[in-house]
Amino acid sequence: MITMPMRGDLPRLLIEAGLALLDEEGAEGLTLRRVAARAGVSHAAPAHHFNGLPGLRTAIATEGFCSFLHELVSARDALPPDADPFQGLLAVNQAYIRFSWRRPALFRLMFDQLPTENDDLRLAARAVYAILQDHWTPFVGNRPPAAFETAIWALTHGFAALNMDRPYPPDTPVNLSSYEDALRLLVG
């Protein structure tokens, strides 16, 4: 017997169905009908709860930023207490890259042209940026802070994007040595 979700659980169920479709099929698989079918609910449910596909995409991207934040925080928290600032910077930025490689369609959606007036999305994205910024700050020195942050973020995001479409099986070790070398050049 199929148990229908409680009314309050339906948005969460739809977001999870959307995340699964995005991971399995990419952006092409993310339609209101496909999400509804995956969740086992009426095809009108996603449109009703999220005011159409743009609202659902925004909710999925917000959830993506929350997962992204969790991974960055986990990387930071896994550092030994005596880790130097570069180890922290490297660990968090490598977690950024690994996330993009593991979930490329979600990563693209998160950085796609989504409505910035959505408070939940904006707060989740800012929380991610704050973790990154905390690890960049010790290396600013006499450089213009905004330009330095842009350079590190461009290096990290660019490295992630350039390597996202390589077909790595999930258990393949990620080679980040060239990224580490480039990061050392930038902060050195």
Image (cartoon, helix red, strand yellow):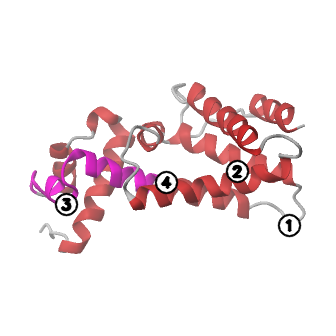
Which quadrant of the figure contains the N terminus? bottom left
Numbered tag placed on residue 49 in the rendering: 3
| Circle 2: element type | helix
Please name the residue shown 68% across and 51% down the image.
Answer: 132
Q: Earlier in the sequence, mark 3 or mark 4?
A: 3
**Magenta region, main secondary structure:** helix
In the image, residue 182 lies in the stretch drawn in magenta: no
| Residue type pointed to by label 4 | Phe
Please name the residue shown 76% across and 39% down the image.
Answer: 148
Residues shaded magenta: 42-64
| Residue type pointed to by label 1 | Pro
Which residue does the numbered mark 1 point to in the structure image? 81
Which residue does the numbered mark 2 point to in the structure image? 92
| Residue type pointed to by label 2 | Val
Could you give the CA–CA distance between mark 3 and mark 4, rounded to whole angstroms? 20 Å
Which residue does the numbered mark 4 point to in the structure image? 65
Q: Residues within 10 Å of mark 4 (few under 14, many from 20)?
A: many
Residue 88 coordinates in the image, percent (x, y):
79, 53
Could you give the CA–CA distance between mark 2 and mark 3, rounded to whole angstroms? 34 Å
Q: Nearer the viewer, mark 1 or mark 4?
A: 4
